[in-house]
Image: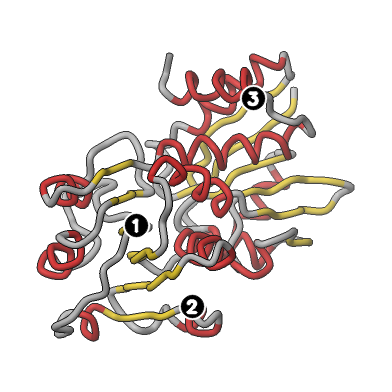
Amino acid sequence: MKKFAIFGNPVVHSKSPQMQNAGFKYLKFDANYKKFHLENGNELKNEFLKNGFIGANITVPHKEDAFLQADEVIGIAKDIKAVNTYILKDSKVLAYNTDAPGFLKAIKSFGKIKSVLLLGAGGTAKAISLALKEQNIDVVVLNRSKNRLDFFKANDIETYSWEEFEPLKEVSNFDLVVNSTSAGLKDDLLPAPKEILEKVLSNSSFAFDCIYGKITPFLALAKDLNNEIKDGEDMLLYQGVLAFEYFTDTKAVESLVEAMRKGLKGE
């Protein structure tokens, strides 16, 4: 039986195992996918190899550590400098980022998006920002502090810290506001000060939270301010389907995607 896992901290909430295992079952692929709680991101590659995994997903906060430890990074992940998928091939750890295309597919239901305010500056934000930029969608990154914004500045993406953004009298109208932080995952926190979010969400049409399976305080506020809202379930599904294709060397047909969606929903 082939072994797969998702590495993260926290990881207890992850629905990736039920989604990936549903895909394996549908394909009759002899494999098992489990959760792996990892405290120290520096141990990621060692644990991956030591435990005999041939593929894995990586979630917060280890995506950037995973990038640094991979033997070879493929595709857009080279620019993002964060990965969420490992594959063991010919004794080498290959790394991919499926968050970027997964996110783009997830927001298609909103229709035409021209401008986005992206909250947070971690690995997921890096993937989303470059994916949006590739599609010629204007993106502005807003983060608590300035010290994690260098990546975005180097990629010619407009950035603000809370401190810089709060006093602005005029705020650009954004079509979509995205939360890529963990605020609201295990708490009732907002991803930015309420007065900033109210200012922005009063003028936006759509709000997306990468957290899935719940209405976070961010989404609740966005809905109160008449935004169409969406959680991260579709992003999780589509990035998971892309990872599954790498895991199994199989092209996912629609019936497989639906089997994985049902697994994600626990059906």
Q: CA distance from mark 3 to mark 2?
A: 37 Å
Question: Is residue 152 depicted above or below 254 in this figure?
Answer: below
Amino acid bearing label 2: Phe
- Which residue is under mark 2? 152
Nearest to the eye among marks 3 and 1: give it. Answer: 1
Give the crowd class for mark 2: few <14, some 14-19, many >=20 residues within 10 Å: some
Give the crowd class for mark 1: few <14, some 14-19, many >=20 residues within 10 Å: many
The earlier-in-sequence mark between 3 and 1 is 3
Give the crowd class for mark 3: few <14, some 14-19, many >=20 residues within 10 Å: some
Quadrant occupied by the C terminus:
top left
Q: Are marks 3 and 1 in contact (CB under 8 Å)?
A: no
Q: Which mark is residue 178?
A: 1
Q: Which mark is residue 193?
A: none
Q: CA distance from mark 1 to mark 2?
A: 16 Å
The earlier-in-sequence mark between 1 and 2 is 2
Residue 59 in percent (x, y) is at: 50, 50
Q: In terms of image quadrants, where is residue 174?
A: bottom left
- Which residue is under mark 3? 32
Q: Nearer the viewer, residue 179 or 156?
A: 156
Q: CA distance from mark 3 to mark 1?
A: 33 Å
